[in-house]
Image (cartoon, rainbow, N blue to C red):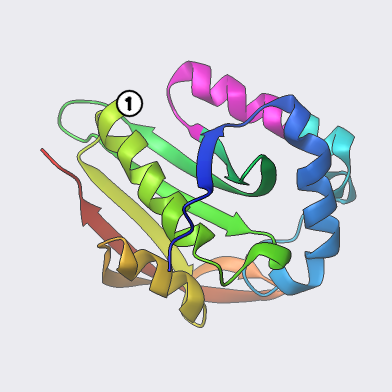
Amino acid sequence: MPSSTTTIRLIEPADAAPIAAHRVRDADAFRPWEPAQPADYFTPEGQVVRIEGLLAGHRAGTVWPGVVLAGDQVIGQVTVQGVLPQPHLRRGSVGYWIASVAQNQGHATTAVGLALRVMTDELGLHRAEASTNLENLPSQRVLRRNGFTPYGVAHSAILLDGSWRDGLLWERILAD
């Protein structure tokens, strides 16, 4: 059931500390699903550098980096990456994570739905894409609830926890 208190907004450098705290606490839980990160990724200072890079991409029009909020608390991120705004492409790829303390409460489903609105209304995109690990059934449920359908497998696509893993590719055509 989607949460009525879930919102998203553009990420800010001030979000670095809560993001770092979540990432430290959840490092083991996210290890099967995400690539290895350098040690500074788990510090507020490292997150500030990462956030500034995301905001530079936002200014360039290639990324829309957001945080997921429950009330006024940062509980995760939702990002539209690889934005291709050209008239013959108009697509972007959605990625997201929710802190373990806020999982299974509808936040991810709501956040992805809100990101799809950003993709349509703000970015003018036609196509949304996503990728999940083949074993990441909770993430696949989030995408299905938001109208995504799987369309293929990217074999040996990402190095996760020391092994090359396959990715399940997802798509959704947005409103014209």
Describe residue 134's horizontal placement relative to residue 39 as left or right.
left
Residue 61 included in the magenta stretch of the image: yes
Describe residue 59's horizontal placement relative to residue 23 as left or right.
left
Q: Position of residue 167 (x, y in %)?
A: 45, 71
Magenta stretch bounds: 49-64
Q: From what the image shows, is residue 140 above or below residue 5? A: below
Instruction: Please name the residue that numbered disc 1 is placed on.
Output: 122
Q: Residue furthest left?
A: 176
Residue 20 can be seen, yes or no: yes
Count of marks, rendered view: 1
Describe residue 22's horizontal placement relative to residue 69 as left or right.
right
Picture residue at 59% right of the left edge, 57% below the top: 97
Q: Amino acid at mark 1?
A: Glu
Comparing 119 with 117, the one in front is: 117
Q: Position of residue 96 (x, y in %)?
A: 53, 54
Residue 34 can be seen, yes or no: no
Q: From what the image shows, is residue 115 above or below residue 168? A: above
Picture residue at 42% right of the left edge, 62% below the top: 131
Describe residue 92's horizontal placement relative to residue 124 as left or right.
right
Residue 116: quarter of image: top left
Q: Position of residue 56 (x, y in %)?
A: 59, 20
Q: Secondary structure at mark 1?
A: helix
Q: Position of residue 39 (x, y in %)?
A: 89, 51
User: Would you call the spot at circle 1 few (<14 residues within 10 Å), some (14-19), or many (20 or more)?
Assistant: few
Q: Locate the C terminus and report the quarter of the image it occupies.
A: top left
Residue 125 included in the magenta stretch of the image: no
Q: From what the image shows, is residue 140 above or below residue 44? A: below
Picture residue at 55% right of the left edge, 67% below the top: 105
Question: Does the magenta stretch mainly form a helix, a strand or a loop?
Answer: helix
Picture residue at 29% right of the left edge, 71% below the top: 152
Q: Locate the N terminus and report the quarter of the image it occupies.
A: bottom left
